[in-house]
Image: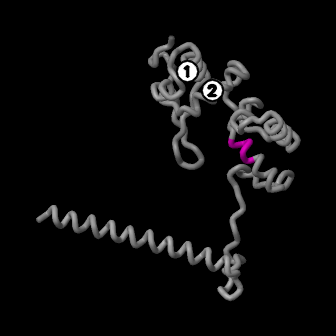
């Protein structure tokens, strides 16, 4: 069994969002997977010991079991055709796979790709031009100049008005309770100071 000291170090890389994320070398991934497969520890305990999330370790093990050591190689960004995306979604549905399982099955870098493809397919957005900066993250922003104003109360149905009234009453009740809690805390502090 490999000790923690024998595992290769990880490097910190600045993401496009300004946050650091960890890149692990293939050897580190392979050692972590082997420790999981050979040892008694579960995902959570081993992940905590290695400084990994449970999800990351679970994904590495699944990729290793499906694709061998090649499944742990660094993935590069590649453009997938709509035909490929549809085949992934069809296979996922036909076989009752989760997004994560489908990503592992097709050796995709991230299950969020499949989530995005499924959303775009449901929205009927397949085949439409997308922003080239980052197709998965760029979403159209609503035009604030053309947003419609809420309907006047006279034009709203009775059901809509009742729903809004119930919401406002609930909001008012929560605010009253919050105020009462703040006053109780304040009076308890005053009593404590005396």
Q: Which segment did they paint magenta?
A: 112-116
Give the percent coordinates (x, y) of residue 96: 77, 36
Q: Is residue 113 shown in magenta?
A: yes
Give the percent coordinates (x, y) of residue 10: 52, 28
Give the percent coordinates (x, y) of residue 42: 52, 23
Q: Residue lying farthest bottom? A: 154
Q: Secondary structure at mark 1?
A: helix
Left or right of residue 67, residue 57 in this image: left
According to the picture, the residue beneath numbered tag 2 turns out to be: 60
Precedes in sequence: disc 1 or disc 2: 1
According to the picture, the residue beneath numbered tag 1 turns out to be: 32
Label at residue 66: none
| Point 16% across, 61% down: residue | 192
| Point 11% across, 65% down: residue | 194
| Point 86% across, 52% down: residue | 127
Local crowd size for mark 1, using a 10 Å CA cut-off: few (<14), some (14–19), many (≥20)? many
Is the residue under label 2 in contact with that under label 1 (CB below 8 Å)?
A: yes
Left or right of residue 126, residue 35 in this image: left
Vertical position of residue 120 compared to residue 9: above or below: below
Closest to the observer, 88 or 141 = 88
Closest to the observer, 78 or 126 = 126
**Residues under labels 1 and 2: Cα distance?**
9 Å
Local crowd size for mark 2, using a 10 Å CA cut-off: few (<14), some (14–19), many (≥20)? some
């Amino acid at each position: 069994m490999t000790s923690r000291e024998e595992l290769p170090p990880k490097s910190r890389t600045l993401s496009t969002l300004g946050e650091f994320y960890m890149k692990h070398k293939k050897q580190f991934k392979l050692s972590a997977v082997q420790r999981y497969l050979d040892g008694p520890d579960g995902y959570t305990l081993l992940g905590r010991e290695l400084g990994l999330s449970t999800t990351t370790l679970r994904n590495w093990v699944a990729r290793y079991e499906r694709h061998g050591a090649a499944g742990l190689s660094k993935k590069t960004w590649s453009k997938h055709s709509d035909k490929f995306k549809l085949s992934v979604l069809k296979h996922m549905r036909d076989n009752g796979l989760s997004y994560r399982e489908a990503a592992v099955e097709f050796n995709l870098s991230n299950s969020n790709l499949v989530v995005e493809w499924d959303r775009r397919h449901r929205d009927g957005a397949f085949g439409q031009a997308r922003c080239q900066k980052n197709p998965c993250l760029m979403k159209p922003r609503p035009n604030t100049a053309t947003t419609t104003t809420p309907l006047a109360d006279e034009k709203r149905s009775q059901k809509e008005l009742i729903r809004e009234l119930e919401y406002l009453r609930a909001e008012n009740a929560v605010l009253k309770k919050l105020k009462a809690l703040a006053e109780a805390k304040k009076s308890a502090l005053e009593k404590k100071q005396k």
